[in-house]
Image: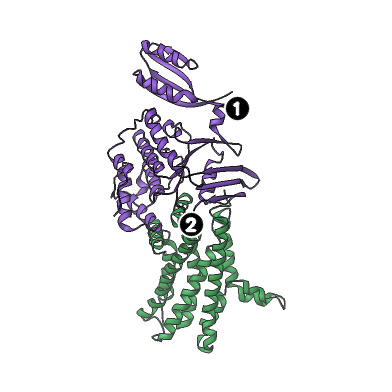
Amino acid sequence: MLNIRPWAAFAVSGPPKQTVIEASTYTKKKEMSDWQAEGDSIGSASPLLTLENVDRSYGSRQVLADISLTLHRGESMILRGGNGSGKSTLLKLTAGIIPTSKGRVVWGERNLRIGFAPDRLPKLRLTSEEYLTHMGKIAGMPNDDLHLRIKELHTLLDLPAGSSSMLIHYSKGMLQKVNLMQACLCEPDLLLLDEPFSGLDTDSSEKLLTLLHGLRVKGTAVVTALHDPLASWEAVSKTYRIREGRLTLEEAAANGEASSVSVFYELDGLLPEETRQRLANAFPNTEWSVAGNALRCRISADVCRDFMHEFWAADGTLLSLKRKEGAR
Amino acid sequence: MKAMLEYLHRCFIRSYRFGAPTVIFAAILALIYSSGPNPIMESYAFTASMLFVVAAAIGSLMIDVEAGNQEMATMMHARSLVRLSGAKLLYAWIFASVLGLLAVLYPTLLGRFERFPMLEELLMGLLYHVSLAGLGVSLAGWFTVKLFESRFYAMLGLFTWIALAFGARGIGEALPGGWEWLTHILPPLQLALHAMIFYGDIGTGAKWLPIGAALGYGVLSAGILLRVLHRRRLDYPGE
C-alpha cells in the first residue's frame, strides 16, 4: 500500500500557504523562505551528480564547452539560455541519454532514479493511464503502488484519471501534464525537466510548482530548463545561463561579477497614490512611470522579492510581471 | 522484459505498422497456395525466404516504433537503451515467428501439399522459418535512423544487404579463387534455402547447420548492434 505523501495530500486540496499570482510567477516571501529552508536542509550530503569539464559537439559545431557543476539532494537548478543554446543537450547529457564528447558525468549513486521530461511528448495512441501504467511497470513499480500513484498524479495535475481518450486527442497542455507525470512517476532522486511549464495554464503551472516544491523538500534534485520567469522557483534555485556553450551562474551576473547582462523585472499594476510614495522611498533604485493609478516599475532582480512583498502589503493589484535582461 | 514486450506490443499494434508487411506476406501465402499440390520443403524454402524479407521490414518498423522523445522517456524508465532495444528486436522476432508459424500451418491445414507433411518436416520447416525471421530482424536493427542520417539511406542499405544475401551463392562463384570466404560475411540465407530445397538428399548435420548458422549470425549481429547502441546511446546522426 502506497502512503499518500504529505505534499501530495495538501496539493490535492490546494496548497495551504502558497499564493501564486499572474501566471503563477509569484509566491509570498515567507512561503518561499519556508520552501528554501526545508530544501536546503536536505541538500548537504555527497553530490548526487557531478559534471566534470563536459564538452559536447555536433559535427564541427560545439554546443557545450567545459561544463562543470555539482548537484546535491534537494537542490534545484534552473537553466536559461536562448533557443539552441544547449539547454536540452545539457539535460540529455545529465540523464545519460546522449554521451559527452569530452569530460564525464558522474552520478553519486549506483541505482540513481532519474526522471526526465523531454520538451514535448508525442501524441500516442494510448490513454494517459495506459501509458503511465506501462512506464511504471517497465520501471518495476509494484502494481498497487503504481495505480495509486497514477491516480494521485492525475488528481495533483488536474487531469481526469481513467479517461478513455487517447493522447492523440489531447491538447498541448494535457500532453505536457502526462509528460510530467511520467517523469515524476517513480519519485526520482534526480528530476530533469525541459520547459516543464510550456503549454500549461496558470492553474496547472501553480499545481506543478506545488509538486516540484514538494519533491524538492523530499530530497529530489530538480533541474529545469526555463524560458519564462518563475520567481517562486527561482527563489529556491540556482539559476545558470548557457551562452556560447558556457555555463555561468546568473547570481554572479546579477552582482556584476561575471556577466555583462543585468536582470530586472518590469511590473505593470495598480497602486493607490498614497502608498506609492512609501514604496518609492523604500526602493529608491526602482524606476517608476505613472498614469493615474496605473504604474510601470523597473525593479532590479536583487530587490524584487522584497518589493513584491511590500507591493502586496500596500494592496497593489498586479497586472503583469515580466523578467527582462539588459546590457550593462 | 515482459513489461517492455507488453508496451511494445501495444505501441506496434496501435501504430498499424504491422499492417503492410503482414498483409503482403499473407497475400503471398494465399497466392502461392491458391493452386496445388505443392512440394513441401521447396514451398517452405520459398515462404521462409519471403519471411526473411518481411521480418527485416518488421524489425525496421519496430526499432523506430517510438518517436525520439518517447524513446528517451521509455529509456529512462527501462534504465538501459540496450534493454529497450533488445526488447524491440525480440518482439519483432516473436511477431515474425508467428507469421512463420502461419506459413507452416496454413498449407498443411488446407491440404495444399502433395501429401500430409511428416512431423519432422513440420518442425524443421518451422525452425527454418523462425531462424530466418531472427536473421532478418537482426539485420534490420542496423539500418535505422539511429545509425543513418536519413531513413532513405537506411532503407537503401537494408535492401542492398538483403539482395546481397540472396545473391551470396552467385557472388561466391563470381569471386576469384581464394576470395570465396568473403561470402561468409553475408547472412547465411542461401545455406538455409539450399538445405530446404535438397532436404531429402542431405544428412542430419547439413539439415541443422543452416538453423545454427542463421541463429548464430543473428545473435552475433544483434549483440554487436546493442553494443554499438550502448556506446552511441540516443545520439542520432541526423541531428
In this orientation, does residue A66 appear? yes
Front residue of B117 and A69: A69
In the image, A121: left or right of B226? left
Cα gap from disc 1 to disc 2, whole angstroms: 45 Å
- Tell which chain the image draws in purple: A
Q: If the image is split into quadrants, where does the N terminus of chain B sit?
A: bottom left
Amino acid bearing label 2: Asp
- Which label was assigned to residue B64? 2
User: Residue B64: horizontal and vertical position, in percent?
Assistant: 48, 57
In this orientation, does residue A116 appear? no
Chain letter belonging to callout 2: B
User: Residue A34: horizontal and vertical position, in percent?
Assistant: 38, 34
Q: How does the figure colour the protein chain or chains?
A: by chain
Q: Dot 1 corresponds to which residue?
A: A260
Label 2: state its secondary structure. loop
Marks 1, 2: nearer the viewer: 1
Front residue of B189 and A279: A279
Label 1: state its secondary structure. loop
Colour of the chain lettered B: green
Which residue is painted at 50% across and 48% down in the image?
A48
Amino acid bearing label 1: Ser
In the rendered view, tell whether residue A221 sits above or below residue B140: above
User: Residue A25: horizontal and vertical position, in percent?
Assistant: 40, 30
Query: What crowding class fits label 1: few (fewer than 14 Cα within 10 Å), some (14-19), or many (20 or more)?
Result: few
Query: What crowding class fits label 2: few (fewer than 14 Cα within 10 Å), some (14-19), or many (20 or more)?
Result: some
Front residue of A298 and B85: A298
